[in-house]
Image (cartoon, rainbow, N blue to C red):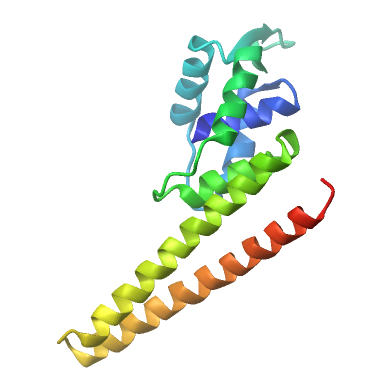
Amino acid sequence: MYDLFVLGELMVGDTHGYQLQERLKRAVGPVRQISSGTLYPLLSRLVEHGWISLRLEEQEGGRARKIYKLTEAGRERFFELMASPLDYTSETELVFHFKMSNFPFVTKEVRLASLEQYLNYLQHNLKYVDSVARMISSKKMDERKRVQVLRMLDHRKHVGLADAEWVTKELERMKSAGE
């Protein structure tokens, strides 16, 4: 998942690890912590695979800065990751957001496929929420708890419906545009 983020950032140009870490922190949001202990082993692995290269840039009065650059193999890997189907995991939304931020680099077909896959994921979740709500409605349990669980599921349903509506409109916009 973070491979896609790093390779996508390097599609724009070379950068150093600290910049990548700051961009990644902004991309994942305020509650998820991305440490150097997560990012730098990832960067080392990407270098080992030949997907990015590393050069040292001397700094005045300090240690050398590590600058990362996308290789041709990394560009190919980026396109593979962008075209790969979304897995249904706890990270699906974040992976979709990483893909969406990289839409300028891929074909319209890849963008449409990503949106359609995410819409399918949302519809899958909505079906699940509906089935759980039906089950809870018929289950014998404390009435206060049942009411609150149903309220929670109603919230999940409304969030999912709003997300699905946005994605549907984006699909329609993209299909009708000459992008």
Q: Position of residue 51 (x, y in %)?
A: 57, 15
Residue 120 versus residue 12 in the image, above or below: below
Residue 77 occupies quadrant: top right
What residue sits 72% from the left and 42% below the top? 108
What residue sits 57% from the left and 42% below the top? 25
As rendered, which of 171 and 150 lies closer to the eye?
A: 171
As rendered, which of 33 and 43 lies closer to the eye?
A: 43
The residue lying furthest to the right in this view is 178
Q: Quadrant of the C terminus?
A: top right
As drawn, is 128 to the left or to the right of 159? left
Q: Position of residue 168 (x, y in %)?
A: 64, 63
Q: Position of residue 126 (x, y in %)?
A: 43, 69
- Numbered circles on residues, count: 0
Residue 66 versus residue 18 in the image, above or below: above
Query: Taking the image as drawn, is residue 30 in sight?
Result: no
Residue 81 occupies quadrant: top right
Q: Position of residue 41 (x, y in %)?
A: 45, 21
Residue 146 occupies quadrant: bottom left
Residue 178 versus residue 59 in the image, above or below: below
As rendered, which of 9 and 58 lies closer to the eye?
A: 9
As drawn, is 87 to the left or to the right of 96? left
As rendered, which of 77 and 11 lies closer to the eye?
A: 77
